[in-house]
């Protein structure tokens, strides 16, 4: 493993040299921002203690899949998750630092995150949330091809919650069939309709348009849970595209295949610290600070 300063130098050099930067962001990016979905973090301790005490839930991820006894209790949890963990949550510092590093670049971001952190910072035409977006609901039965922005519904549920329940009449229902609604995120009932195809189309068109250029694939916080969406495609494209280079930043799962040893770099460091240091170094080189 190279020393961190060498890592920063190579990262900035490759970003500067690239004609195109394709960013792949996953759970580790929000983890680096302090928004932990798989650990008992600050967000969970601040807003979900009553759910932890009553149901034994240990983190946001387990809470999402917990078999609540009633719909009223499940939606109370989801309303809290989306009110405090999505709509009201400010963009984390790693996302703001990434924005600075990408300024003036030709870039696109593909993400498996559903927390809308990328969308809080970057233009929507530059971001493809290919695993859904927690800011939207869909029909559980997929009776029609539409997703619904849920901010008002979530806020109303949250404001009228009593303990760990919401009033029955506030449970989201489909405006077409009257059945249950579900978060528009990857699940057994995930709606792969127009909204989903639109996100994939944006991403694929960007790749096709730029595949013959000097491309940097920058992977941030992608683990081993779903490598087929970002990690493995990035490896494949880097291997086959003659002018592509791959950089992965992850304290635990920065994996560089032997086939990419001459076309890639694995940075086994904290994502937040790497991006913060890269921004400072970039500003220093630009003469903006001493």
Image (cartoon, rainbow, N blue to C red):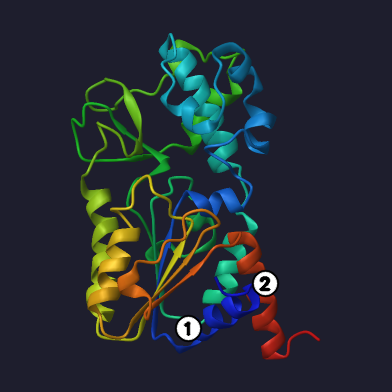
Choose between 179 and 235: the one closer to the eye.
Answer: 235
Q: Is residue 155 visible?
A: no
Q: Where is residue 168 in the image (x, y as percent from the top left)?
A: 44, 11
Q: Which residue is drawn at 64% across and 17% down?
A: 50
Choose between 165 and 284: the one closer to the eye.
Answer: 284
Quadrant showing the C terminus: bottom right
Q: Can residue 30 be seen in this view?
A: yes
Q: In which quarter of the image is residue 124?
A: bottom left
Mark 2 falls on what kind of element? helix
Q: Residue at x 29, y 26 (%)?
A: 174
Q: Name the residue under label 2.
A: 277
Q: Position of residue 133 (x, y in %)?
A: 40, 45
Disc 1 from disc 2: Cα separation: 16 Å
Whether residue 181 sits left or right of residue 54 in the image: it is: left
Q: Residue at x 28, y 80 (%)?
A: 210
Rendered image: mark on residue 156: none
Q: Position of residue 48 (x, y in %)?
A: 62, 25
Choose between 8 and 112: the one closer to the eye.
Answer: 8
Mark 1 falls on what kind of element? helix
Q: Name the residue under label 1.
A: 14
Q: Position of residue 113 (x, y in %)?
A: 43, 49
Q: Upstream in the sequence, badge 1 or badge 2? A: 1
Q: In this view, does 199 lie above or below 257?
A: above
Q: Is residue 24 above or below residue 27?
A: below
In the orientation shown, which residue stands out farthest toward the top?
A: 69
């Amino acid at each position: 493993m190279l020393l961190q300063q060498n890592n920063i130098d190579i990262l900035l050099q490759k970003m500067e040299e690239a004609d195109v930067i394709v960013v792949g962001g996953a759970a580790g990016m929000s983890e680096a921002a302090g928004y932990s979905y798989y650990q008992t973090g600050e967000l969970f301790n601040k807003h979900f203690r009553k759910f932890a005490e009553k149901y034994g839930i240990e983190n946001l991820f387990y809470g999402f899949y917990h078999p609540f006894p009633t719909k009223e209790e499940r939606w109370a949890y989801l309303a809290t998750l989306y009110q405090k963990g999505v709509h009201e949550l400010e963009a984390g510092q790693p996302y703001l630092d990434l924005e600075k590093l990408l300024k003036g670049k030709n870039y696109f971001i593909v993400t498996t995150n559903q927390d809308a952190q990328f969308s809080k910072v970057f233009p929507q035409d530059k971001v493809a949330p290919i695993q859904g977006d927690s800011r939207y609901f869909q029909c559980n039965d997929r009776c029609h091809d539409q997703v619904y922005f849920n901010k008002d519904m979530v806020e109303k549920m949250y404001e009228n919650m009593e303990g760990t329940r919401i009033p029955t009449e506030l449970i989201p229902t489909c405006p077409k069939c009257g059945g249950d609604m579900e978060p528009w995120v990857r699940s057994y009932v995930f709606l792969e309709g127009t909204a989903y195809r639109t996100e994939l189309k944006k991403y694929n068109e960007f790749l096709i348009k730029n595949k013959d250029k000097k491309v940097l694939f920058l992977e941030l916080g992608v683990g081993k849970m779903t490598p087929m969406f970002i990690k493995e495609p990035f490896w494949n494209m880097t291997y086959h595209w003659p002018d592509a280079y791959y950089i992965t930043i992850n304290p635990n799962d920065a994996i560089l295949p032997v086939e990419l040893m001459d076309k890639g770099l694995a940075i086994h460091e904290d994502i937040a610290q790497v991006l913060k240091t890269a921004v400072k170094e970039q500003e220093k080189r630009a003469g903006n600070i001493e």
